[in-house]
Amino acid sequence: DERGWVALGDCHQRVGQNQVALELYGAGMIAAEPAPLCAIARFRTLWDLERTVEADEAFEEAQRLLDEGSDSSLVDRLAREREARP
């Protein structure tokens, strides 16, 4: 379940281990495919690290996953995440 990957990544982020968090989100995207929550978390982390080109790519990946799954609550969440990061 991708929620476990997101929770574990979040724990690492909270102690400043952002690279480990990114690796966990990426692993979650493979292990729990499709994993839009991991893609959203990856986007947010990359943006916060000012790795904007990679963040844009992660946003597009999250958008693609959500387009395939049509979960409206996650679509709204992704839109809010993007709006918070101009």
Image (cartoon, rainbow, N blue to C red):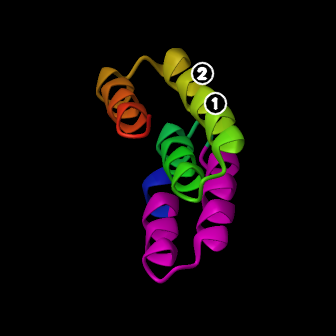
Task: Report the magenta stretch's main SS.
Answer: helix
| Residue 72: image location, x then y, percent | 32, 20
Q: Secondary structure at mark 1?
A: helix
| Residue 53: image location, x then y, percent | 70, 39
Name the residue tied to disc 2: 64
Q: Is residue 61 above or below residue 45?
A: above
Q: Which residues are magenta?
A: 5-32
Residue at the image point whose x is 29% and y is 28% from the top: 73
* Mark 1 Cα-neighbour bin, 10 Å: few <14, some 14–19, many ≥20: some
Q: CA distance from mark 2 to mark 1?
A: 5 Å
Type of amino acid under label 2: Arg
Quadrant where the C terminus is found in the figure: top left
Which picture quadrant has residue 20? bottom right
Type of amino acid under label 1: Glu
Q: Do the residues bearing badges 2 and 1 touch, measured as CB atoms within 8 Å? A: yes
Residues 70 and 86: in front is 86
| Residue 51: image location, x then y, percent | 66, 51
* Mark 2 Cα-neighbour bin, 10 Å: few <14, some 14–19, many ≥20: some
Residue at the image point whose x is 63% and y is 34% from the top: 56
Q: Secondary structure at mark 2?
A: helix
> Viewed as shown, does residue 27 lie left or right of 48?
right
Which picture quadrant has residue 63? top right
Is 25 inside the magenta-drawn segment?
A: yes
